Image: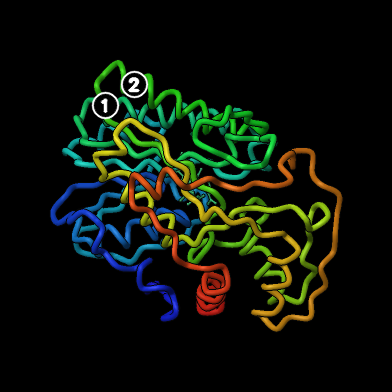
Amino acid sequence: MGTQRNPNINEASQNHQTMKNLADYQILVTGGNGAIGCNLVRKLLDLSAKVTVLDDFSQGKKKNLATKKNLMIIRGDIASKKILSKVFSCHYDYVFHLAARFANELSVKDPLEDLRVNVQGTLQTLFHSAKNKVDRFLYTSSSSIYGPQNNNLCKENSIPHPSTPYAASKLSAEHYCHAISELYDLDYTIVRLSNSYGPYDPPGRYRNVIPNFFQAAIQKKDLVITGTGKETRDFTYVDDCVNGIILAATSKRAKNDTFNLGTGKETKMLNLAKLILQRTKSRSNIVFKPRRSFDHIKNRKMDISKAKKLLGYTPSTDLQTGLQSTYDWFVSRK
Ligand SMILES: NC(=O)c1ccc[n+]([C@@H]2O[C@H](COP(=O)([O-])OP(=O)(O)OC[C@H]3O[C@@H](n4cnc5c(N)ncnc54)[C@H](O)[C@@H]3O)[C@@H](O)[C@H]2O)c1
């Protein structure tokens, strides 16, 4: 369970110099066992914070975090008042709210469960955070809230067009952040993440394209692209996401504001598949299938100029390096 890191990962993505000193800060991370959450927790512990994780392990029974001093892991549902009362029995300086039911496909199958976890669960966590007088509530929203945009470029002030239940639930929870902040004077920051990838992101039916391509390539199965391969996404290495999340939560300039976190660069799905075949030296085929009913977004590019300017956010891991690090983790995991 040790952290797998490629030594080639750009130093800037790992240094702490621009980060606030979090020594002895009490931090709650919901969804802290997840793909982004466990990387965030490791970074917070590196920054000497005291971290409590609340996770129901619904996205994987396996613990992604080893037992550590300054880390407490509580298993439970964010939508349960009883669990939240227990978790919030001490004071937190920051709450990083990442727990969510993930994936557009799953949300199409069961939108009510999405609503329960992503909206009701967020609302309960907001209430408790306000009562707890936390310094900042950080909410991880998603680029999916933008839906189809005219020029594919997503800016924070673009009008959102959520086109799946997941996207609708993520946007709805953003609105609750504003509302609870107004009502109870809770400071919050929203980050809209684009497609994150890296160590601890497992493959699976409802999971992300990069681990699923790696799994298929390693197992000599077809890499299936739903579409023409010209579709694009902004793939962001998890360390860059984590740095952006911490900068946003701890920056005074980010109070009650919303930021895109991505790389600002688009990658075509076909290029991604080819890079993964090269990296794994796999002879798997790339096959094309029709787009799925919920694949409304052909191309997406994040405008990250606001986070760069106000937070000093600088994504620094290029796709080749990030994929190598992801592959190293993939082959080393048990
Ligand atoms: N990964 C991405 O590309 C991406 C992109 C945009 C936004 N996001 C957002 O970032 C956050 C983290 O994403 P991730 O990729 O780490 O997802 P993930 O699925 O790997 O992690 C989510 C974690 O939340 C936990 N969880 C789910 N339901 C819960 C519940 N009811 N109570 C407690 N815990 C619960 C899961 O067990 C899991 O560990 C999510 O809010 C997601 O919507 C992720």
**Percent of width and height locating residue 67:** 28, 65
Dot 2: element: helix
Asked whether the viewer can see residue 33, the reply is no
Report whether 241 appears left or right of 279.
left
Q: CA distance from mark 1 to mark 2?
A: 7 Å
- Residue wearing tag 1: 186
**Percent of width and height locating residue 233:** 64, 53
User: For mark 1, does the 10 Å Cα neighbourhood hold few (<14), some (14 to 19), or many (20 or more) residues?
Assistant: many
Please state which amino acid type lies under the numbered disc 2. Answer: Ile
77 and 39: which one is in front?
Answer: 39
Report whether 312 appears left or right of 238.
left
- Residue wearing tag 2: 180
Q: Image quarter for residue 15? A: bottom left
**Percent of width and height locating residue 124:** 37, 27
Q: Quadrant of the N terminus?
A: bottom left
Tell me what residue is drawn at x 42 percent, y 23 percent.
176
Dot 1: element: loop
Report whether 327 appears left or right of 311.
right
Q: Are marks 1 and 2 in contact (CB under 8 Å)?
A: yes
Asked whether the viewer can see residue 22, the reply is yes
Position of residue 303 relative to residue 203, above or below, is above
162 and 292: which one is in front?
Answer: 162
User: For mark 2, does the 10 Å Cα neighbourhood hold few (<14), some (14 to 19), or many (20 or more) residues?
Assistant: some
Report whether 309 appears left or right of 104.
left
**Percent of width and height locating residue 280:** 66, 80
Q: Image quarter for residue 33? A: bottom left
Tell me what residue is drawn at x 36 percent, y 33 percent.
257
Residue that lies at the very extreme toward the bottom in this rendered image: 281
Kindly tell me whether mark 1's CB lies below 8 Å from ligand 1: no
Residue that lies at the very extreme toward the left in this rendered image: 24
Tell me what residue is drawn at x 19 percent, y 63 percent.
69
